[in-house]
Amino acid sequence: MAKSPTKETIKRATVADMKALGIHKPQYNRIIDIYAELVFQYNTLTKEFEDGGYKYEVSTDQGGAKKSPILASLETLRKDILAYSDRLCLNPKSLETVTVETKGKSALAAALSELS
């Protein structure tokens, strides 16, 4: 079984993905840190849920059943991760709304290259 990535590994991968998409700025690092923590927690809880046999209901004191706390936490984390991935433009839908800054030639460099 593969080892789960650490929070730092998730953060580095996220920054690399954003750089590859041309949308990373150092000012986003605080948000990326929170996103990495959420993904790390999600991975940890998913592993715990899997190890527990995917128990999705627990008994109540009244004899009924309710959603297990770990499942409720996973659902909340999924929503939070989606919200942060939208803000960081890490999914196709949110990336469509962003204009990626491209570093082109300066006007002087373009003029000089035309003279050659």
Image: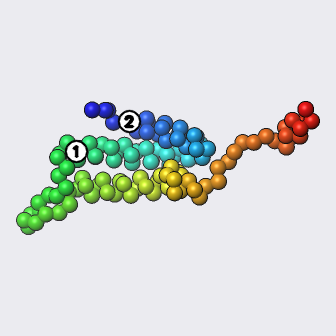
- Residue 10 in the image, given as x and y percentages of width and height: 43, 39
Q: Is residue 114 left or right of residue 38?
A: right
**Distance Cα–Cα, label 1 vs label 2:** 18 Å
Instruction: Name which quarter of the figure residue 77 lies in.
Output: bottom left
Q: Which residue is mark 1?
A: 50
Kind of residue sitting beneath label 1: Glu
Give the label on residue 15, or none. Answer: none
Residue 24 shows in the view = no
Q: Which residue is mark 2?
A: 6
Residue 41 shows in the view = yes
115 or 17: nearer the viewer:
115
Residue at x 20% of width, y 42% of height: 51
Tell me if mark 1 has few (under 14), some (14-19) or many (20+) residues whose alpha carbon lies within 10 angstroms of its own. Answer: few
- Residue 92 in the image, given as x and y percentages of width and height: 51, 53
Q: Secondary structure at mark 1?
A: helix
Of callouts 1 and 2, the N-terminal one: 2
Kind of residue sitting beneath label 2: Thr
Residue at x 61% of width, y 44% of height: 22
Tell me if mark 2 has few (under 14), some (14-19) or many (20+) residues whose alpha carbon lies within 10 angstroms of its own. Answer: some
Q: Is residue 17 left or right of residue 48?
A: right
Image position of 59 with respect to 33: above or below: below
- Residue 48 in the image, given as x and y percentages of width and height: 23, 44
- Furthest residue in direction left, as rendered: 63
11 or 99: nearer the viewer:
99
Q: Quadrant of the C terminus?
A: top right
Q: Is residue 12 left or right of residue 96?
A: left
Q: Is residue 10 left or right of residue 75?
A: right
